[in-house]
Structure formats: C-alpha cells, structure tokens
Image (cartoon, helix red, strand yellow):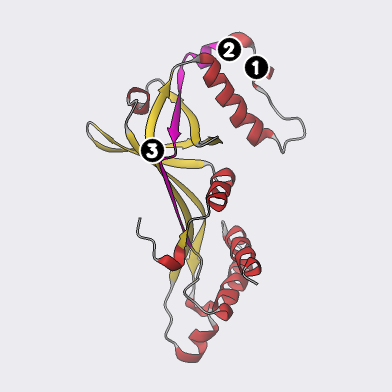
Amino acid sequence: MYAPTSFRETRREVLRDLVRVYPFATVIVQAQGGLAANHLPFEWHGDALQAHVARGNELAAMDGAQVLVVFQGPQGYISPNWYPSKHETGREVPTWNYTVVHVHGHLRVIDDAAWIRGQLEALTDHHESGQPRPWKISDAPEDHVGKLLGAIVGIEVAVERIEGKFKLSQNHPARNREGVITGLRQRDGDGDMELAALMSQREESAL
C-alpha cells in the first residue's frame, strides 16, 4: 500500500481499534482463476482474526493460502472550499480523506463445531451488546443451530504484518484541517460525522 510518512499509522492499538469499530473486511486471495475477493465480518482473538464462511465459499478449500484482509474506516470527499487557504490563493484542489488497515497473513481453515460455535458467539455477543435484550446463539433451537454449524467452517488469519493509512489532511496546516472538520459536520452525509470526529480527536491528542 502506498503510504507517505505523514499518513502512515503504525500504532497497533489504533489499528486494532479501527478493526473493532469497522469489522467488515475484504479478504483478497490468489485463487485458481485469478484474484478473488470475499467480504466478511471479523473478530480479533489474541493475535489473529477469526471469521466463518459457507462450505461452498472458495476460502473453505484454501487452507494455508496467503491472504490480505482490508478494513476500511471513515472516509469522504474533501472540498477545497473548506480550506481558508483556498480563499486566499486559490491553489487548492479536492481530495479524499480515508482510513484503512491492511492485515497480511496465511489462512487457516478450521472444521470444528465447538470452535465455530465459539466464533459465532463472540461475533454475536459483540454486535448484540448494545441491544436492550441481546440475542444469543442459545436463543435458537439446538437442532437448527446444529444444522447451520454443519454448513460453515471457521477461518483464522494469524497477523503476520499489519499496516495502516490514515489520510486525514495531515499535509495541511491546522486551520485547513479545522476547516475540513467544520465542512464535514455541516455536510453531515454518510460517514461525515465519523470522519470529522476522528479528525477532531487526532487534533486534540496532538495538543
């Protein structure tokens, strides 16, 4: 991934936090017919990412394959009109701010009902935690759960290398960054508030 120094994020806790908040990822692998991409929600477990796929998914037959798992956080179009410097010199152009995490590793396919059930419980417990009455695997009939468990396999990617790129206007002066935050909040489109909050948080942490 092309990542200029100013946009490179290496703090492991920051990268893990993005994965926790935005766990839906693209898994890229070299398959027989060329590159293949699948889209899955993951959970961190120790130093590995865990998920599950249908037995018919090509990943289920690719134990040991090298994979790239891509997570994307807040992102959005940035108008040069938001830069104070644009109104002084006109020498500004549009850009796109975004946050991504790339995890590199090898795929491990796990065909074990107890492991798969544990992965499903971790996934649902995480995403049901904000519900008034969180749903649990045990809420479903056991025979139904057993049938579904038989239709999927677990996958795990041990994290061999992780890299992040947080392109958040770091190459602009503080007043332009503040202009972007204000502009995102006023536009309030899909993901704009999340992107503005992340930029604002980083500005405050730099003080």
| Location of the C terminus (image quadrant) | bottom right
Q: Describe residue 17's horizontal placement relative to residue 93 as left or right.
A: right
Q: Are marks 3 and 1 in contact (CB under 8 Å)?
A: no
Q: Quadrant of residue 106?
A: top left
Say if 11 sits above or below 117 in the image: below
Against 133, residue 198 (above or below) is: below
Asked if the stretch drawn in magenta spans residue 107, the answer is: no
Q: Amino acid at mark 2?
A: His
Q: Which amino acid type is marked by label 1?
A: Ala
Residue under circle 2? Answer: 144
Label 3 or label 2, whichever comes before in sequence order: 3
Q: Which mark is residue 105?
A: 3
Percent across and percent down for residue 107 are: 38, 31
Q: Quadrant of the N terminus?
A: bottom left
What mark, if any, has residue 40 been given in the picture?
Answer: none
Residues rendered magenta in the picture: 144-166
Tell me the element at label 2: helix
Residue type at mark 3 is: Gly
Q: CA distance from mark 3 to mark 1?
A: 34 Å
Q: Circles 2 and 1: CB distance less than 8 Å? A: yes
Asked whether 148 falls inside the magenta stretch, the response is: yes
**In the rendering, which numbered label is found on residue 140?**
1
